[in-house]
Amino acid sequence: MNTLTRLESIVSRLPRPGLTQILLGALILLQFPLWFGQGGWIRVWRLERQVEVKHLENEGKRLRVAELEGEVRDFKSSPRAAEERARYELGMIMPGERFVQWGEPARPAATAGSADPSTPKAGRP
């Protein structure tokens, strides 16, 4: 028995597909690119999520730009705005001025055995 006759006998034993099976196969072949292809639904959904993330990032950046524009308007309208900012953020003082800060001094962390750090510990001179 040669190879061609063996192949024909194998093929003849396979069940013949019906119309329903052929149409189902065609439907699957047509749906595959719609779902998984270059412009498929899955890729479109992924790209829509990326667009939403970028919109949120842009909104945050718009708010930051609005804040910076407000600061620029302050600097243009008031000559003392730069001086005020330098004093507040950088702690700068003018020549001849003295820096005085009001408020309670920072307390060091309580040590074991003493609630008040200013009181001497027992056994120490």
Image (spheres, grey):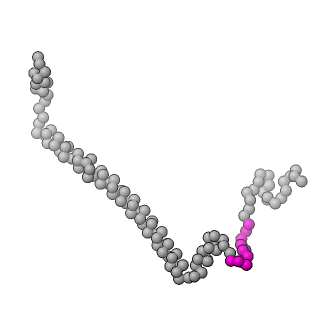
**Magenta highlight on residue 103:** yes
**Residue that appears at 13% across and 21% down:** 3
User: Front-most of 86 and 31?
Assistant: 86
User: Front-most of 123 and 73?
Assistant: 73
Q: Would residue 9 be visible to someone looking at this image? A: no
- Left or right: 2 as drawn, with respect to 36: left
Q: Quadrant of residue 96?
A: bottom right
Q: Would residue 109 be visible to someone looking at this image? A: yes
The N terminus sits in image quarter? top left
User: Front-most of 111 and 70?
Assistant: 70
Q: Residue furthest top?
A: 1
**Residue that appears at 60% across and 74% down:** 85
- Left or right: 28 as drawn, with respect to 57: left
Say above or below: 118 vs 21.
below
Residue 25 rendering spot, x and y as whole percentages: 17, 40
Residue 42 rendering spot, x and y as whole percentages: 30, 50
> How many numbered marks are there?
0
| Main SS class of the magenta portion in the image | loop
Q: In the rendered structure, which segment of residues is drawn in magenta?
A: 94-105
